[in-house]
Image: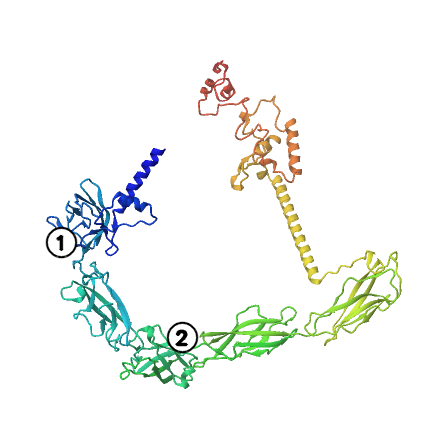
Amino acid sequence: MMAWLQMWTTGLMAIMALSDSLGISEDSGLPAVDDERRGPAEIVRKESHPVLFRQKREWIWNSLYVEEEKPVTIPYKIGQLKSSQRVEVKRFEIKGEGANTIFTVDDKGDLFVNRTLNREEKSAYHLTARMYDGNNKVIEDSGDFVVQVTDINDNTPVFPRTYNGSIMERSPIGAQVVKVRATDADDPTTANGELRYTLIPNGDVSAFQIHTVTGMITCKISTLDRETKSQYVLVVQAQDMRGMASGSTATTSVTINITDTNDNIASFTRGTYEMQVPENHKLNEKIGILELEDRDEDQNKEPIFTIPDEHKKMFNIDLTRNKDGNLMLKQALDYETRDSYTFTVKVRENLQFPADNAASAVTTAQVIIKVLDVDEPPVFSQPIYTFTVVEESLVNNIGTITARDPDKANKSIRYSISDKDCPITINPLTGQLSTLRTLDRELEATHMFQVKAQEEPSGLESFVKVNIIVQDINDNKPELSVDEIFLCESDNAGTVIGTLRATDKDDQPASFSFSLANPSSNFSIKDNGNNSADILVKQGPFSLDDPRDYSVDVSISDGGQPVKTSVTKLAIKACRCDARRIPTHCKAVAQRMGVSVHALIAILLCILTILVIVILFVMRKRYQKDSLASMKNSGEIHEQLVTYDEEGGGEMDTNGYDVSILTSACHDGSLLRHPDRHPHPSLYAMVQKPPHQPTACKGDMAVMIEVKKGEADHDRDGFPYDTLHIYGYEGPESLAGSLSSLESSSTGSNLDYDFLNDWGPRFKPLAELYGVDGPDHYHQY
């Protein structure tokens, strides 16, 4: 451990000795080397003191500069690295930006540049240097120095874009327009990068100027006029070297637009404007346009029109989108009253500057309007008519509708009402209104309709609205309005058991008076004089066991002109009440139902309709029954078997079959007899069954037929028996022949059915029916 500490102390002393050998110049900022070296005794002495003193040493070299863009065929020297310490240097070492590539150093300390440099790429290189003695020990350490690349004028100015600016016409001198700016890659701290701006004379430079340093373009006149020239194009030149002739230049264009202001008076394009307007021209619509000429832009035009006072009520002028004058109609024209108008219109503008065209502008114009005659529809004397009619009366002269032809022709007018249900009629020639029937205010208080007035013959037409107000009369009886009236068993004489009121459908104010139509009852009425009355008990108390029902006949008079009176029977219930006269149990009262006339008529109509339907239904059933009976009695129909389609189609889906043979079989063939009344052999004698088999009309079959017939006659909902699709009995005398295989014959067949014998035992009966007689033809299987 002691040995390691001794070695660490020796190393630290050596490092401190090396650090004392380096120094930094306070004047130049560069390292320096002391002239004398310190011995070990001095180092030991300094270590024993708290503050160390060392002698200053420094690098010695000139400022190092390299000119940019200098061609390098062989490396050239730009300076020498040396120290103030007088020792023999054997080797120099440099580090930093471009060390040993762009810059190299030899053993003498000479610094060389190996290639061409560009200041715009890099303007300074930071390097450090060291010196070593013959023993390869560091003499001077970490000496920093900078190689500056000096600028030359090798770049031209550049404008990033073209410029656009604007300025209002009549702007003052010195008004700023736009600022241009160019760039130069050369050193801006030298003349190589300092730019100056000028306007090239080949542009229009009479109205503008530019600041040579800032590049701000300003106006140098106060008479810019957009109407004369609305755009200027300037060419700006930027030159480095502070504008000297040897400097590089660049140019750009600047477009300056002159914006508009209102500095021209609007002028009429014509001295006289003539217009023709039909008399039915709509109000507040354009009659014509008063064209103006104004060199200013539309948004800056502010023409003000003036019309003489005597024509302001009739005409008005509005501005169009182009700031021309729209002549508008304010009041209706009438050719018959006035057929022309002539007046003078003036125009002016509020300008901020003296007008350029003040001497040449036409500010007044004459307007001539000619009114054209138009065939106009009739005109009513009033926009709407209102009349009053007393209800329940026929009035021959309600009022008169009047219309006229506004034209000079003054054609006659014919009046009509288009509403067919209107209770009012009009005289087509005079326009006088009258009633077709009496009016009822309670059903409809006001009748509204339109009257048409048309020029004869078949000319123009107009319509007007007419209101007929139905005036009320006292034609309705008062109606009793009362809540449920009841009496209590404990009610004594003078007890009020209810209050009566009345209503009236008439519009007139009524003064109702109440009284009893039957004053002998046990109740009385006290009229309060305010359209109400109280019902009082004359004698009490009462008992619920009393079988009598209580009622009063209330007579009400409305006091109108004429007086209307009504009598209403009011039922009064008898109840058992508590101490507060609140009913707890009431005796049922036989209610008398009243039916209005309208309800009675509706009920009678319903009953009549039901009776008619029942009669028609009975007649139809009887007709069907008679038809069925006639069909049973008719031999032609009775002898038809009818089959229907499976889905129950109509008459077109049926097939008829003659069944007269059945009847013939039942009556010994009587239907097949000839008119000579002599019996003839049956048509199907050749296929009749042997005598030992029962006939169709005897035995069980006859009984079955009678049973089925009886069921069909008594079954109202069933189909007739002759419409059954499947029959239980074939019949021995069917025209189609018997379908039974018993005793069937094939003698009448023109075909040979011997092949049926080859079909097996199942077809044996069919083969016997159609095959050759004799047992020799039967095959055994």
Residue 562 location (% of width, % of height)? 73, 76
Using a 10 Å C-alpha cutoff, classify the residue at mark 2 as few (fewer than 14 neighbours), some (14 to 19) or many (20 or more): few
State the image quarter where residue 268 is shown.
Answer: bottom left
Does residue 661 appear anywhere in the picture?
A: yes
- Kindly state the secondary structure of the residue where label 1 is placed: loop
Residue 709 located left or right of residue 426: right
Whether residue 101 is situated above or below residue 586 in the rendered picture: above
Residue 742 located left or right of residue 90: right
Task: Give the number of marks.
Answer: 2
- Kindly state the secondary structure of the residue where label 2 is placed: loop
**In terms of depth relative to the viewer, which is nearer, 488 or 403?**
488
Using a 10 Å C-alpha cutoff, classify the residue at mark 1 as few (fewer than 14 neighbours), some (14 to 19) or many (20 or more): few
Which residue matches tag 2?
A: 285
Q: Quadrant of the N terminus?
A: top left
Does residue 698 appear anywhere in the picture?
A: no
Residue 435 location (% of width, % of height)? 60, 74
Which residue matches tag 1?
A: 70
Q: How is the image coloured?
A: rainbow
Mark 1 vs 2, N-terminal side: 1
Residue 82 location (% of width, % of height)? 18, 49
Amino acid type, mark 2: Glu
Amino acid type, mark 1: Lys
